[in-house]
Image (cartoon, grey):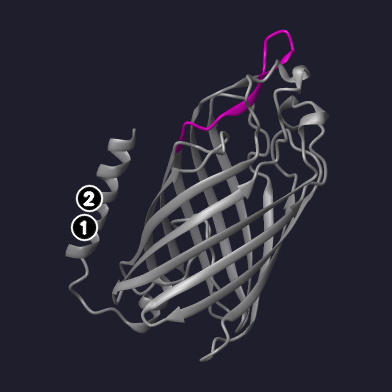
Amino acid sequence: MRAILAAVCVLFFMGVALAADEPMIPQAASDAGNLEAGFPTSIIDNTTVPQGRLVVGINAGIDAGSPYPNVQDDGTPAFSWKRTILTSMWEVQYGIMPDAQITAKWPLIVGKGVVSGNFDTTLALLWAPVKEDDTMPALGVEVAVRVPTGYGKSGWDASVTGVASKKLGEVGTFLNATYTTIGNNDDFNNVPAVSRRNDTNSFKLGADYMVMDNICLVADYVNQQSWLSLTAADTDFGGAPDPFTVDRVQLLEIGARMAVTDVDTVSVGVAVGVGNGNITPDMIGTVGYQRLL
């Protein structure tokens, strides 16, 4: 699986380099450098959709080697160590002001295991009022809420993300810090209550570089608290092996965005699990397409 994903990335980067001979208009360069979660990595920046314009996007990916909670045939909770799932996300963004955009997104997950939350709606508002200058980074905040419109999920989750970005020469640097409160996961994949958190936090550090007028490379590090809080003492969860503690998801992500026209942008990204977090996936691969309307 790793070899396949690596080959896809190599082919993509070769293709974008060969396709980048024609000069692009400024809008295309702006679209290539507009970092959005899932297109191609999970980090976001303070760039917003132009006021009065609409962006529609879709991505598809594969998540290889994620541990996941499950339920045995007799209803007893258990923990399955690894799974491979296919993912997709539909996203619509609209620029409501020069420095603000609203986003709606809907996920789809296909694979082994009990999957809750498919087609839940996430609504988000990104506001970036502070512009970068010689000393200050650009600052913004994104507020998001998950509405249980999909399969098998109840309650509303809410999150707030602080976004900072600063140019260091030709390299853009980014910091995301997120706090999420979980409204109700009583029936989430039938995981016992003792093993769930009511809130989580995460931070992401990243950088990007425009290698050509229409091609942006991005890399980042993700450290995210798992919604599970499970140790070997949680025997009602089927007896987690010792030592076993579900704590943080840790990933290194790398990707590229290419504006192929003045309104069309494609992306590809790969994430590799790092650190000691045993709920971290082995590898995630994502491809995406966005169109400015």
Residue 217 to residue 115: above or below: below
Residue 174 to residue 84: above or below: below
Residue 254 position within the rendered picture, expressed as x and y whole percent measured from the top left: 39, 55
Q: Can residue 48 be seen in this view?
A: no
Q: Which residue is drawn at 63% across and 21% down?
A: 242
Judge from the rendering whether residue 81 lies leftward or rightward of residue 247; answer left or right.
Answer: left
Residue 68: in magenta span: yes
Residue 273 position within the rendered picture, expressed as x and y whole percent measured from the top left: 47, 42
- Residue 15 is labelled as 1
Q: Is residue 18 visible?
A: yes
Q: How far apart are marks 2 and 1 (CA)?
A: 6 Å
Judge from the rendering whether residue 111 lies leftward or rightward of residue 196; answer left or right.
Answer: left
Q: Which residue is drawn at 60% across and 28% down?
A: 68
Residues tagged 2 and 1 counted as in contact (Cβ below 8 A): yes
Q: Residue at x 55, y 89 (%)?
A: 135
Label 1, secondary structure: give it.
Answer: helix
Label 2, secondary structure: give it.
Answer: helix
Q: In which quarter of the image is residue 145?
A: bottom right
State the extent of the magenta-drawn residues as a range: 63-78
Q: Toward the viewer: 238 or 159?
A: 238
Which residue in the rendered view is the most extreme toward the top? 74
Q: In which quarter of the image is residue 101?
A: bottom right
